[in-house]
Image: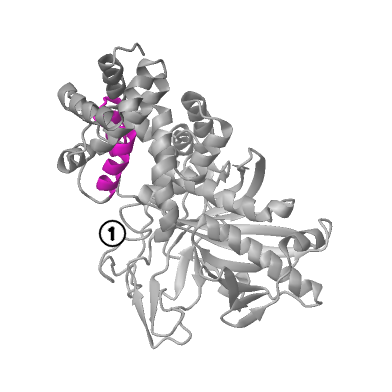
Amino acid sequence: MSTTTHGPVELMDYDDAIERFDPVFGIEVHVELGTKTKMFDSAPQEFGTEPNTAVSPTSLGLPGSLPVVNGTAVEYAIRIGLALNCQIAESCRFARKQYFYPDVPKNFQTSQFDEPIAFDGHLDVELADGTIFRVEIERAHMEEDAGKNTHVGGATGRIQGAEYSLVDYNRAGIPLVEIVTRPVEGAGARTPEIARAYVQSLRDIFRALGVSEARMERGNVRADVNLSLRDTPQSPLGTRTETKNVNSFRSVERAVRYEVTRQAALLAAGGSITQETRHWHEDTGTTTAGRIKSDADDYRYFPEPDLLPVAPSRAWVEEIRASLPEMPVARRHRLQGVWGFADAEMRDVVNAGAVDLIEATIATGASPASARKWWMGELARIVKTTDGELEDLPITPTQVGELQGLVDSGKINDKLARQVLEGVLAGEGSPAEVVAARGLGVVSDDGALLAAIDEALAAQPDVAEKIRGGKIQAVGSVVGGVMKATRGQADAGRVRALILEKLGVEG
C-alpha cells in the first residue's frame, strides 16, 4: 500500500503485476532548443533572467504582433528528426492548439498537428546489459513552450490551496521539439528500465547534436509518460494515464513502475482506469490524479493563418544529414575500445554520465585509468551523498587532469591528492594553488627524510636488526613511522630506498 496526499492507494507487487498484466508505454519528450531567440519572435532565450524581461509583444500575445519562424529552430528540428531515423517532411505547417491557461498569453499554443516536420522514425536503445530494444517514433514536431506559473502559499506548491499565483512569460515562446513514440509493446518486466534508457538516450543525442543543453533539472528536457495495462499481449490496448513533466531519468523509471503497480491493483479488484493526466511526486514516489485527458479534437486545432508552410529543400536536408556528428552509442563503443575499459566499467561510466568528463580529462594528458579512477571513485562518492550529477561538481576535467599530473610527477601522492581534491571542491583554487596554500607537496629532500628515518629507527631499534637479518618486509613499519612524522607527505618509495641504503641492505 502507498500513501499519497489523497490518502492510501492499493498497490500490487510489481512482479505479481507483470505476471498478471502486459504493460504498454509511450513517452512524449519535450526538448527546449538552444537557440538565441524564441520560436516566433526576437525575444532572447536566457535562463535565470528576471521574470517577464525576456519577452516581446509576440511572446506576450499582444494584439497586432505577428510571428516569424526561427530558421535555426527548424534546422535543429531536422537534425533531431534525422538522428531518430525519421522521414523529413517536404512541407509542413503550424497549427493553433486552442486552450486557456494563464501561462499561455495568446490563449492558444502554436504547434504542429497533422503535418509534423519529422515522422516514422525509430531509436535503438541500449540497456545496461548490452541488450538493444527498438522504440518506434511516430513523430517529432515543432512548437512553442508556455510560460511558468508559480503558486504561492499552500503546502504542495500547486494551484489547489495556493493564496495567489505569479506568471513569468520568459519561457513563453521558447522553441520546443516534441518527440512522440508509438505504443511500446513487448517490454514486459523491463518496461521501467527501457523507459528510462529511452529518455536518457534522447538526452545524449540532443547534446551530441548541439541542439540543447538538455539539462533535465532546468526543464530543458521533460517527459510525459503514458502507461496502460492489458490482460495479454494479444488483448486490445488498455486505458492509459499520462504522468506529466517527469524531469529525471530515475523518476521516469519510478513513475512507470508505480503506475504499473497502481493500475494492476485497480484492475485486479474489478475497477477501471480513468484516462487522465497525473502528477508525479518525487518525495513520495507516487502519482496523483490531475485532469481528465482531452482528445486532440477538444483542442480545436486549425492551421495557423499567420505562418506560411515550412518546406525544407532536399538539398538542405541532405546537407544537414552530412553534418551530423557521431551518435552517442557508436561513440561510446569506439571510446571503450580506445580506453581499454571492460564492459562493466564502461556501463558504470555511461550510467554516471561521465563519458564526456573522462574524455576531456584524458585530453589533458591523464591516462584513461587515472581519469576513470577520479571521476568514478572519489568524485562519484561525493555525488552519491548529494544526489546530484558529476557535471555539476565545482571541478573541471582540466583540474582533474592537473591533479593527476601532480601525482604522476611525484609532487604529491595519492593520499595528498585526495586532500588537494577537497581544496579544489571547496573553491580554494587550482590543484597547484591548493598544494601551495596548504603546504601539501611531497617531502623529497634527502636530508629531511634521513632525519625522519633516524627518528623512526630510534623508536623501533629491533626493526633495524630484523631488516639487516633479511626480513625486508619489516621496512614497512619504518616507512610508516616516517609517513606519520611527515603527515603523509614523504615520498614513500624514496624513504624505503634510503632506509635500505642506510642499513646496508640491498632491496
Report the residue marked by disc 1: 44
As drawn, 13 above or below 345: below
Image mark count: 1
- Where is residue 97? Give x, y as percent: 51, 69
The percent coordinates of residue 274 (x first, y second) are 69, 76
**Region of the chain picked out in magenta, as a range:** 399-425
Please state which of residues 36 and 310 is positioned toward the viewer in this rendering: 36
Answer with the quarter of the image where residue 253 lies: bottom right
Q: Which residue type carries mark 1?
A: Pro
Residue 93 drawn at (x, y percent): 50, 57
The answer, for residue 362, to whether it is visible in the render is: yes
Residue lying at 38% horizontally and 64% vertically, measured from the top left: 173
Front residue of this view, candidates 112 and 139: 139
How dense is the environment of label 1, judged by Cα within 10 Å: few (below 14), some, or many (20 and up)? some
Give the image quarter of residue 12.
bottom right
Query: Which residue lies at the image location 27% right of the left edge and 21% below the top edge?
Result: 494
On whether residue 409 falls in the magenta region, the answer is yes
Q: Residue at x 37, y 67 (%)?
A: 172
Q: Is residue 353 magenta?
A: no
Q: Position of residue 506 (x, y in %)?
A: 34, 11
Towards the viewer: 37 or 279:
279
Q: Is residue 75 left or right of residue 42?
A: right
Residue 75 visible in the displayed image:
no
Which image quadrant: the C terminus?
A: top left
| 161 lies above or below 88 | below
Magenta-highlighted stretch: main secondary structure? helix
| Residue in view at x 32 percent, y 28 percent | 478
Is 379 displayed left or right of 115 in the figure?
left
What colour scheme was applied to this rendering of the protein? one colour
